[in-house]
Amino acid sequence: MVEISKTKNYGHFENSGETFVITDIETPRHWYNYFFNDEYVSFTSQVGFGEGLCQDSMGRRIFLVSNRNVFLKSADKAWSAFGLPVGYGYTDYACAHENGASTVSLTYEGVKSAVRIFVPNKGKYEIWSVTAENTTAETKELSVIAYAKTEIDGTYRPQCYSLGKGGFCEKHNAVYGHVYAAYETAKNRDVWGYMSASETADGYDSRRNAFIGPFGDEQHPVAITKMLGCQNSECHSEKLCYALENKLTLAPGEKKTVHYLVGVALSWDEMVTPTAEWAEAEFAAMKAKYARDLAGVEINTPNAQLDNLVNGWLKYAAHMGSRWARVRHNGYRDLTSDTECFACVNPALAWERIKRILTFQYDTGYAPRTFIDGAIKDRNFADNTVWLASAVATIVKELGNKELLNEEVAFNNGTVATVYEHIRRSVDFLFNFQGLYGLVKIWGGDWNDCVNFAGLKGKGVSVWLSIAWCYANKRFRELAVMLGKEEDAALSEERGKIMAERIEEYGRDKEAGYYIYARTDDDIVMGAHDCEEGQIFLISQLWSVFAGLENAAEAMDKAEEILETPIGIRLAYPAYSHQYDYIGSMAEKEPGTQDNGGIYLHPSAWKLAVDSLLRRPDRVEEGILKMLPGANAYGGETCGEPYAMYNSYFAPETGYRMGTPGQSWRTASSSWMLKSVVEYIFGMHAEMEGLRIEPCLPLSWKECSIKKVFRGCTYDIKFIGNGEGTDVIAMKVNGEDVAYERNIVPAKAGETLKVEVYLGKK
């Protein structure tokens, strides 16, 4: 077994977990934060490294920022306000990542600096506020030089054309680059990328070779290494950049701030020039918006790391995911699932977002993989529509308004139907999308994108997707019953029984006692005990519980027996050691990596919910401890951000990578861990009659609490456990003993209900 060495603490949480302050700049890798509105998304690490892009309604994108830096220059010294290069001699370094903003501060040469980056509530831009304070007894003459690398004119490659044009606009006090691109139109149009400043610019550069130089880089541009400052460079058919210089005179103890805006404009007059008052007002409005949007849930448990994660970051990440999915692309399933998860915090906003998502659905009921570059793209994925029923049912029950189902929303061809009809067609489509044995086709992939060869002939089936359909069908039946659609409800029940029977007959390894994953076009089984590799897949077992299949509990027992490791539960085992022509890119990944036998955290988050449904509080606690970022089962830190969820941990056979994380932020792990904690572990189940309280809390949590805003009512719930069980054995509301049917506490809009829930074993 490979030991993971314990690493040091690089920072700490503040503000009830909402802020993480990095105090050691040299983390094992970049630790990121994200900022977004409906038009623009950006991210930065603790040294300013990151990107920013804007996107229109059909996924056309303009890649505005591909890196950034801010330099301070005196007569004989120049340095980066982001702390680069590392080890340069800076003191008092800190980076405060918070919801919606990041601020990097440090001291060098008697100057205390701070750079704050955020994206306002509206607009295709990000704002950098650069403050310099003179801590010496002598007057300081300084230049602030802000620099943004850009790909608005395409990614630079040697010996390729660069056709951008750039210069300076006095009217807007901005350096700009002009290109033609398709944005909000199918044809190319004028597009400007620009950087403007709140103070009159004393210099600019729009040509990369003038600022960086042919042999420099973003840390060592010739404008800085040769102490040149900005060169007032125009750009004609060369690589663009944006750089502005502002000269400051600082008396002893004086500080000044310059605000920079880096943005995209679709007309010359659309450029925005910031003022100090405007920039601060935009920042305050952004913070107020997140305070409102994320106020719906707050937990307090004996596990401070979990509290910090849920209260400070999971809500924020789910908010971003429900609008921007995985950022790199607009994954349909990702948007749908993240929106469902965000509903436990802000169902009203989730409802608006799910209606937007439905507009990309086909009128057949099928849903695409993505919409990007101005087009809806299917990419042969079969599962995208299966997530809709649960998302809609969850949000409607959170809001308690069945009439929402009658709201009309367009399909992607412009025809219009009610939300209910959208969901009915999604369930119908998949039931009729039948391959071998009447199970649902896998086509070019299901949730596991990388099993992309199994069903391209149109015969292969996904047992997991067939099980997931059973769950979606169950959620659809809830909607049919709400609206009194008796025929739909009866048909749904009949079809559910048919599919469940097919799964039990053709989708279950009866000898092994668990559900298989798929059958390929040639009826090669994936996920059975007699397979050479890939003998069991976790997701089929997990979803058998959600779907209520008869052998679900046994399947989960078998999954834990085979797949559990000291650092988390695997997605599949044994990992594939080489490519199989009927699997796809899953088998091309090294064993123990991501979906090929890795500790994939999205299913791990599902497992928290499943263990709660199965009333297994010990497994719930174990799952939480293994999933939490920042530390693994060996006591060593994972090298990733302590405030963000990852897509995976690497499994033991990966050597030095064991226990270390994959990518952060761009993963459903964040959203589903939020949902699993709030809805399943704390038991905050929305029903039309009210909030059903049915927790499955770790037995070691003798006391914990949750605040949840539900239909305008604030539930302030305290749980008191005796350590013997997690069943609700008594309840008080506002000090009075109550006994509600199914523990459903009705909402009282505008009121706060103080609820005490006593847990034990019935």
Image (cartoon, rainbow, N blue to C red):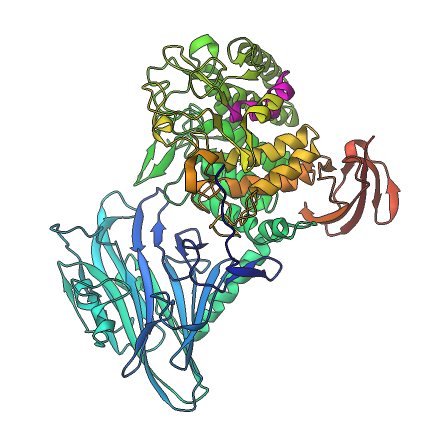
Q: Is residue 352 visible?
A: yes
Residue furthest out toward the bottom: 138
Q: Position of residue 412 (x, y in %)?
A: 39, 32
Is residue 589 inside the magenta stretch?
no
Report the front residue among 157 and 10.
Answer: 10
- Above or below: residue 554 compared with residue 285: above
Q: Position of residue 251 (x, y in %)?
A: 41, 89
- Above or below: residue 40 compared with residue 426: below
Look at the magenta stretch and give its main secondary structure. helix
Which segment did they paint magenta?
537-555
Q: Is residue 406 visible?
A: no
Report the front residue among 658 and 587.
Answer: 658
Q: Position of residue 720 (x, y in %)?
A: 80, 45
Report the front residue among 2 and 716.
Answer: 2
- Give the quarter of the figure containing the C terminus: top right
Quadrant in which residue 407 is drawn: top right
- Above or below: residue 410 compared with residue 277: above
Q: Which residue occupies 84% across, 49% down? A: 734
